[in-house]
Image (cartoon, rainbow, N blue to C red):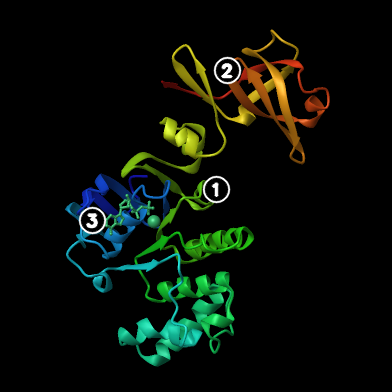
Amino acid sequence: MSDRKIKLQIKDMTKKYDNGDGVEHINLDVYEGEIVTFLGPSGCGKSTILRTIGGFLDVTSGDITIDGKSIVALPPEKRPTAMVFQSYNLWPHMTIYENLAFGLKLRKIPKKQYDKDIKDMLALVSMSGTEKKYPGQLSGGQQQRIAIARSLLLKPSLLLLDEPFSALDAKIRQQMREELKKIQSDLGITVIFVTHDQEEAMALSHRIVVMNKGKFDQVGTPEEIYDSPQTLHVASFIGEMNFIKQDGKTIAVRPEDLTVLLGSGKGDMDAVVRTTMLMGHYVSMTAQCGENVIKCFVDREISDKLAVGDAISLKIGKHSVFDQ
Ligand code: ADP
Ligand code: MG
């Protein structure tokens, strides 16, 4: 790990708005070629951090460096970053070609060079042949691909994406994830991605930063965050989780980490079948266990032997324990 190059460093950064909202004492190293995702509920400060990196907001204190150089005094266009927003921000009266060429012309890149770059980039985002179309003639997913292409043409050292897919349908959103991953690994660029969608974060990221109320709760790989949540907030925000209150502690265990045994007195706790729902190849079951309603995923060969009201016992597999 130590030989990896640090691309972005956020050092004890605080950004406070006049009303007191914002983020405090943020520290993060992002390595070259990584996709790091800020994940958290709306209002937790994800966009605030992204905008301080992109230069659309000044920091209140602390520093941000890219390739070891402080960037906090630079305006957005002087930073080696490019940002893509949720709304695609393509110019409706310009063709796709003109939209893509705009930033390159401003940078005085010769037309001969950027003609080729635009052609290559359209191929990369699977949008070849759309040069003469207008944004309004493309679907939402296609427009967002053009918006990403436009950012990539500026050859940013760091690509910043603020909930870029959240306006798209679920199916297109999944396709876009895969394409972004492919583009990222083809180009080897470093990406900071913002989302409130935990599934999107898990699918895309090398590392996830889980945020809550202006602070970092946990930074880790998707596996670390899913398997070993460090706080109750992380445990409840990522995936499905049961919280079982016992002896002043809270046991957090996922539905797939509970084993259902027929009859009482066989596992870690006794329960009664409350509901069952066929999900396809497995059954999602809830069981009443004292005060607790517990969800478990059960193989169909087990659930076929069970009816509502039956006595069962539950064996707890992988879990985390939190003080209440
Ligand atoms: P997220 O992107 O995670 O939804 P934001 O970074 O947009 O969160 O917002 C973090 C907090 O800062 C919220 O409480 C929000 O209301 C507040 N906030 C965001 N922008 C401004 C602003 N321009 N002025 C004052 N408060 C703001
Ligand atoms: Mg936001």
Could you give the CA–CA distance between mark 3 and mark 2, rounded to whole angstroms? 49 Å
Callout 1: SS = helix
Question: Is the shortest distance between ligand 1 and the CB of mark 1 under 8 Å?
Answer: no
Instruction: Determine contact: label 1, label 2, CB under 8 Å.
Output: no
* Mark 2 Cα-neighbour bin, 10 Å: few <14, some 14–19, many ≥20: few
Please name whichever residue, 75 or 45, is drawn nearer the observer in this view of the structure.
45
Name which residue type carries label 1: Glu
Amino acid on which disc 2 is placed: Glu
Of marks 1 and 3, which one's residue comes earlier in the chain?
3
Distance Cα–Cα, label 1 vs label 2: 30 Å
Q: Is residue 107 left or right of residue 117?
A: left
Quadrant in the rendering for residue 233: top left
User: Closest to the observer: 176 or 152?
Assistant: 176
Q: Nearer the viewer, mark 3 or mark 2?
A: 2
Task: From this view, report whether residue 275 is shown above or below residue 45.
Answer: above
Left or right: residue 129 compared with residue 280: left
Foreground: disc 1 or disc 2: 2
SS of the residue under disc 2: loop
Residue 7 visible somewhere in the drawing: no
The answer to whether 216 is drawn above or below residue 261 in the figure is: below
Q: Where does the image place residue 227, in percent across and percent down from the top left?
A: 51, 33
Going from N to C along the chain, the mark reached first, 3 or 2, is 3
- Which quadrant holds residue 17? bottom left
Look at mark 2 in the image and give the residue it sits on.
291
Q: Tag 2 or tag 1, which sits nearer the N-term?
A: 1
Name the residue that disc number 3 marks: 64
Q: How many residues crowd around disc 3 within 10 Å: few (fewer than 14), some, or many (20 or more)? A: many
Q: Dot 1 corresponds to which residue?
A: 199
Residue 239 at x, y = what percent?
55, 39
